[in-house]
Amino acid sequence: MKLEKVPIYEQVKVFIRTKIKSGNWVAGNPVPSESAFMHQFGVSRMTVNRALRELMAEGVVRRVQGSGTFVAEIDQVSSKLEIRDIQEEIEERGHVHGTEIIFAGKTKANKALATCFNLPAKSILFHTIMVHLENGVPLQFEDRYVNPRLAPDYLSVDFSSTTPTRHLLDVVPVTSASYSIEAALPNDLEARYLKIKTSQPCLVMVRTTASSNQVASLARLIYPASRYSFKGAFQ
């Protein structure tokens, strides 16, 4: 079975967000050039440009013609989204949570993943792919990479009784997190396990969590738009 990976442009975005969240890059600091990211991640200019354009649209960076890209000033109004455990969320509605494990094992980090996790190239990462069900109906397709140094027992967890999110929240203190949400169509694997057509729109969240400036987890969470909506708050 061919395993789908988090798109590289999303990995570039995660890397930039992590640098900002950790305080390594502060408001007003210049962001490395597109050429620098191309060399660092081994990707095309188009891929880097997409990541920077999306971060600019999200208000994370600002681009000044002729000068480059800079970390944006923090707005007075910022969105807040809690890290929710899908099992708890389903059970709060009085429904039954179920899990279907598609893949659980180890993988060697490609250059982009190694950069995101700030690990040497070809370092071992834990990788799980699963589907979460609500009353037997697929609700979330989860594709997650985990840093073994922070969660060494991850692959021995019984994910039929708990979730990756719950386990990681229990064993790894989260000091920062970042996410992006976009509308997208599912690939063949996602559509098959979500039991939808590839033409059916989905909501896709890419979320990274870190502990003491070390990235603990990178997850791509796909929800059929007809079955789920995100809720948040402003402060």
Image (cartoon, rainbow, N blue to C red):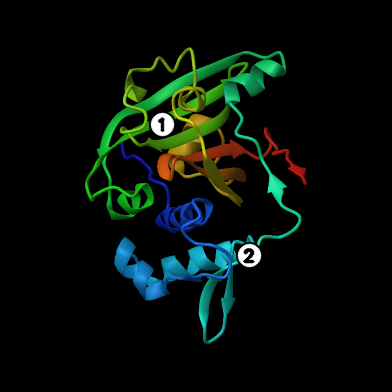
Relative height, residue 124 to residue 136 (above, below): below
Residue 129 in the image: x percent, y percent? 41, 31
The quadrant the N terminus occupies is top left
User: Looking at the image, which residue is at 38% across and 17% down?
Assistant: 157
Q: How many marks?
A: 2
Decide if residue 198 is in sight here.
no
Residue 123 in the image: x percent, y percent? 23, 43
Q: Nearer the viewer, residue 136 or 112?
A: 112
Residue 6 in the image: x percent, y percent? 42, 47
Q: Is residue 229 left or right of residue 98?
A: right
Residue 57: give its label: 2
Residue 13: give its label: none
The residue wearing badge 1 is 129
Q: What is the three-letter code of the residue carrying label 1?
A: Ile
Q: What is the three-letter code of the residue carrying label 2?
A: Ala
Sooner in the amino-acid sequence: mark 1 or mark 2: 2
User: Looking at the image, which residue is at 49% across and 16% down?
Assistant: 162
Q: Is residue 205 left or right of residue 104?
A: right
Q: Dot 2: within a 10 Å radius of its alpha carbon, few (fewer than 14), some, or many (20 or more) residues? A: few
Q: Is residue 88 left or right of residue 112?
A: right
Q: Residue furthest left?
A: 122
